[in-house]
Amino acid sequence: MNIIALLILMAVLVVITTLTVLASRRGEFQRRLYACNIAEGVHDCAVSRVADAAITSRHLLYKKGAADNSITVAGASDWPLGTVDDEITAEEISGGVQVAVQLLGKGPTKRMVASGVIGAGVTVYAAASGKVAATGTVVVGTSLTAASADGDVIEVADCIPVIVTPKQ
């Protein structure tokens, strides 16, 4: 009987010691600052940038803006950085709020706004006003879903933008 009580006491001491060690490590973890979504260093799939103007439509293509850390809507012949899945007001911009730019050619598929009819499985190009089209000079990916009208949101297997020249 004394041996059983001794074994139980030893097991309780092991549990208490383990919990004490884990609690001390947890406190150490909580005292550290872990920052994410900052615009310094190496980035995997997205970068944080300040928008040059309010963003009222999601999933448009954006390019480098007036400053090195800013973005503006890309045009048909611009080199787009990526898409923005958020909306932001002018007040938020003046307050220094940044948005995440989902880099083209990195990470998962992207949603993009079509400028007109686009079939599924076709090459997609940058178009005016940050949209994409079935023709153009800057390839941004391959459509995975179809668009039947201007403003439709499609899924695109994106790539690093490539400028192509038309055949003569």
Image (cartoon, rainbow, N blue to C red):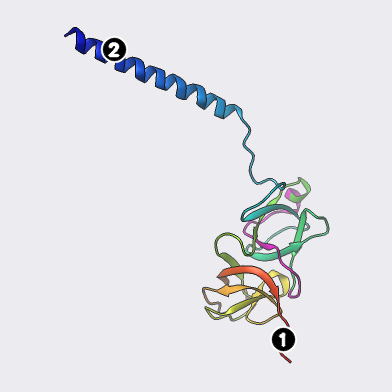
Height in image: 128 above or below 20? below
Residue 75 percent location from the top left of the image: 75, 72
Instruction: Assess whether residue 80 is covered by the magenta stretch.
Output: yes
Please state the horizontal and vertical placement of residue 135, each as a whole percent of the image: 66, 82
Q: CA distance from mark 1 to mark 2?
A: 81 Å
Residue at far top of view? 2
Mark 2 lies on residue:
9
The quadrant the N terminus occupies is: top left
Q: Nearer the viewer, residue 70 or 151?
A: 70
Residue lying at 72% horizontally and 71% vertically, measured from the top left: 129
Identity, as a three-letter code, of the amino acid under mark 1? Pro
List the single residue furthest toward the bottom. 168
- Residue matched to label 1: 166
Give me the residue at 62% from left, 81% from top.
Answer: 134
Dot 1, how many residues are within 10 Å of its Cα: few (below 14), some (14-19), or many (20+)? few
Q: Is 131 displayed left or right of 91 in the figure? A: left
Quarter of the figure with the C terminus? bottom right
Question: Percent position (x, y) of residue 146?
Answer: 53, 77
Residue stretch in magenta: 76-92
Q: Nearer the viewer, residue 119 or 36?
A: 36
